Image (tube, rainbow, N blue to C red):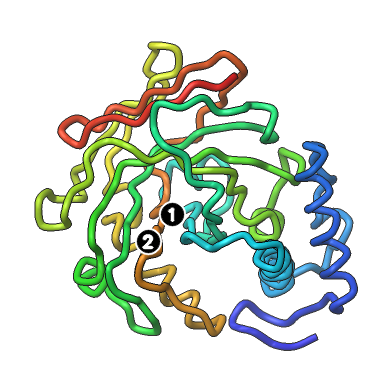
Amino acid sequence: MSASPDGERTLDDAAVVAIADELAEADRTRTPVPLLTARHPGMTVADAYAVQRTWRERGEARGRRVAGHKIGLTSKAMQAATGITEPDYGVIFDDMVLESGGVVEHAAYSNVRVEVELAFVLAEPLAGPGVTVTDVLRATDRVVPALEILDARVEMPGRTIVDTISDNAAMGAMVVGGRPVRVDDVDLRWVSALLYRNETIEETGVAAGVLGHPAAGVAWLANKLAAHGDSLAAGETVLSGSFTRPTWVHPGDTVHADYGTLGAVTCRFA
């Protein structure tokens, strides 16, 4: 056990491995586990990132490739929806990246919801501390409309920041599409979207809802990773955080996010 930027570790390595194993089994069986914080009341954010790191390392050992990172809980809409008031992050593996217009297997995920986001594709690495919005914009090759599919492997409700971090920030998959843009082609703060489920608008939002500017989420991530001895690599895709509340989806639902001049992202759940 050791200190970290997220406080003291309270769980030993064996306990961290046991939780990572439990979450891997929950992912395999599509059966969420009981709240971690209810069973490990002293569990800290540092413990949670240790669990996530163990899960990530096992995925890489099996040949999965890290394609990027996701940022969660950056907007007031998401914080109000979850009751959690600090951001978190998780890993995106390459097999989590889906193309717009496809069919998604609903049964492959648990507690399935979707969110509207912008994805930043980096042309240059970003390493904190001290990364700013300007640094992010300079390092970005393009910004792409995206949907995030949430996959909760820890039961709901009652989840805390510790539960979500351990659960890889509830990352299930991302669906990318629409019209990629350069950062100077559009004022990213004013990118907006209409989220339809089965031809009914469920949510609307503006990208400035993410910390005032969606690039601010990417800057937060780069600086947070630096505190953990990590950084963002060139070529990575970063989901910058949802600017709508999550929308529940069910088998047979069609989801369509209209980004106006940036096009649309669509998928159907079967």
Q: Quadrant of the N terminus?
A: bottom right
Amino acid at dot 1: Thr
Residue drawn 55% across and 56% down? Answer: 93
Q: Quadrant of the C terminus?
A: top right
Q: Report the disc number at residue 24.
A: none
Give residue 6's position: percent from left, percent from top.
Answer: 62, 77
Give residue 113's position: percent from left, percent from top.
Answer: 56, 32
Left or right of 8? Residue 193 is: left
View extreme (left): residue: 185
Residue drawn 23% across and 31% down? Answer: 263
Q: Secondary structure at mark 1?
A: loop
View extreme (front): residue: 63
Position of residue 75 relative to residue 49, above or below, is: above
View extreme (bottom): residue: 2
Position of residue 5 relative to residue 63, above or below, is: below
Quarter of the image holding residue 39?
A: bottom right
Give residue 267's position: percent from left, percent from top.
Answer: 45, 25
Quarter of the image holding residue 211?
A: bottom left
Categorize mark 1 by other alpha carbons within 10 Å: few (<14), some (14-19), many (20+). Answer: many
Categorize mark 2 by other alpha carbons within 10 Å: few (<14), some (14-19), many (20+). Answer: many
Location of mark 1 (residue): 74
Residue drawn 49% across and 21% down? Answer: 268
Amino acid at dot 2: Gly
Q: Nearer the viewer, residue 43 or 50?
A: 50
Position of residue 22 relative to residue 263, above or below, is: below
Cβ–Cβ under 8 Å for marks 2 and 1: yes
Cα separation between marks 2 and 1: 7 Å
> Between disc 2 and disc 1, whose residue precedes?
1
Residue drawn 37% across and 61% down? Answer: 217
Location of mark 2 (residue): 217
